[in-house]
Image: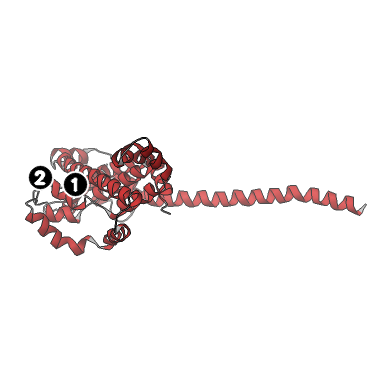
């Protein structure tokens, strides 16, 4: 009789315990979802606010700036005059093209040098390999401000001042890109190399036919990160590019903020919104490859 009672109590307790576990799991899930939504809001708010402000006239931006009200965030009379002013009067399209040239050149060179160097450090054996790799990584800890003057002297001595190559050639090799690709190439089984060599493939053929097809997620990650870095560059273009017609968009927008003649807050917000779009689109398109690339490269 006692055993039957205990059995019945255990049978009744199991659904209750399962229900409690499920409720706890649902609560944790709700907390996680709420936290992600809050973080998303905090990061998205400045972008959305800038986009809405770009639809105001400059006079409206100044008039609704203080005190804060509903109209501080939403345009009372939406207009596209700021975008028209950007492209018609301020030649914004030319600055976008200059930035695209600088970013495209830097991304292409970084992908080239990072894949070649990463493959050499991961798959080839040569004297001093690990020492050279370590010294390469140490350069990542040197800020641009420290080498700005000697870098300018080198580029100027080569006669590249105020040229498009000057915007991206000094950054053709990046320690992060080399490290990322080295870690990714190291994850590829060496049996694939051995099988290719048995078939008569040389080093270059193995690199192009075996190694590169297996590191596409890491390549997408490198493209995304490097594109963001180069698109947001400011200090180096400000120093090396003395031709206003070849200047990049970030420096141009900074000039709008410090315009001595009249306020350009409306076009400034329109420009900020426009230059943010390529970053958002690139991040969305390459998002899944970015996550997979970091996971396969061993970076946590």
Quadrant of the drawing holding the C terminus = bottom left
Front residue of 132/154: it is: 132
At label 2, counting other C-alpha atoms closer than 10 Å, the crowd grade (few under 14, some 14-19, many 20 or more) is few
Left or right for 63, reference 194:
left
Residue 27 placement (x, y as % from top left): 59, 51
Q: Which residue is mark 1?
A: 249
Q: Which residue is mark 2?
A: 245
Residue 113 placement (x, y as % from top left): 25, 47
Left or right for 60, reference 21:
left
Front residue of 1/69: it is: 1
At 85% from the left edge and 53% from the top edge, which residue is drawn? 6
Residue 20 visible within the image: yes
Front residue of 195/180: it is: 195
Left or right for 129, reference 237:
right
Tell which residue pokes out farthest to the right in this image.
1
Residue 171 placement (x, y as % from top left): 21, 52
Residue 106 placement (x, y as % from top left): 22, 46
Could you tell me which secondary element the residue under label 2 belongs to?
Answer: helix
Tell which residue pokes out farthest to the top in this image.
199
Could you tell me which secondary element the residue under label 1 belongs to?
Answer: helix
At 82% from the left edge and 51% from the top edge, which residue is drawn? 9
> Which of the 4 image quadrants contains residue 150?
bottom left
């Amino acid at each position: 009789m006692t055993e039957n009672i205990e059995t019945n109590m255990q049978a009744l307790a199991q659904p209750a315990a399962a229900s409690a576990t499920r409720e706890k799991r649902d609560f944790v899930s709700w907390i996680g979802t709420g936290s992600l939504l809050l973080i998303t809001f905090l990061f998205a708010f400045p972008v959305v606010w800038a986009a809405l402000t770009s639809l105001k006239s400059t006079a409206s931006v100044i008039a609704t700036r203080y005190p804060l009200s509903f109209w501080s965030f939403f345009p009372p009379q939406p207009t596209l005059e700021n975008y028209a002013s950007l492209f018609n009067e301020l030649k914004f399209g030319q600055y976008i093209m200059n930035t695209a040239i600088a970013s495209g050149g830097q991304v292409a060179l970084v992908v080239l040098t990072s894949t070649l160097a990463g493959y050499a450090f991961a798959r080839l054996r040569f004297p001093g390999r690990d020492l050279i790799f370590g010294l390469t990584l140490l350069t990542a800890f040197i800020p641009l401000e420290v080498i700005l003057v000697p870098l300018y002297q080198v580029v100027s001595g080569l006669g590249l001042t105020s040229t498009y190559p000057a915007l991206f050639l000094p950054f053709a090799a990046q320690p992060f890109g080399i490290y990322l690709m080295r870690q990714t190439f190291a994850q590829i089984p060496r049996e694939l190399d051995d099988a290719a060599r048995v078939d008569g493939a040389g080093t270059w053929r193995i690199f192009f036919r075996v190694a590169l097809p297996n590191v596409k997620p890491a390549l997408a990650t490198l493209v995304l990160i490097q594109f963001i870095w180069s698109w947001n560059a400011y200090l180096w273009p400000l120093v090396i590019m003395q031709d206003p017609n070849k200047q990049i968009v970030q420096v141009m927008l900074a000039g709008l903020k410090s315009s001595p003649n009249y306020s350009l807050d409306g076009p400034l917000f329109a420009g900020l919104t426009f230059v943010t779009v390529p970053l958002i689109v690139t991040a969305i398109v390459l998002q899944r490859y970015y996550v997979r690339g970091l996971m396969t490269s061993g970076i946590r």
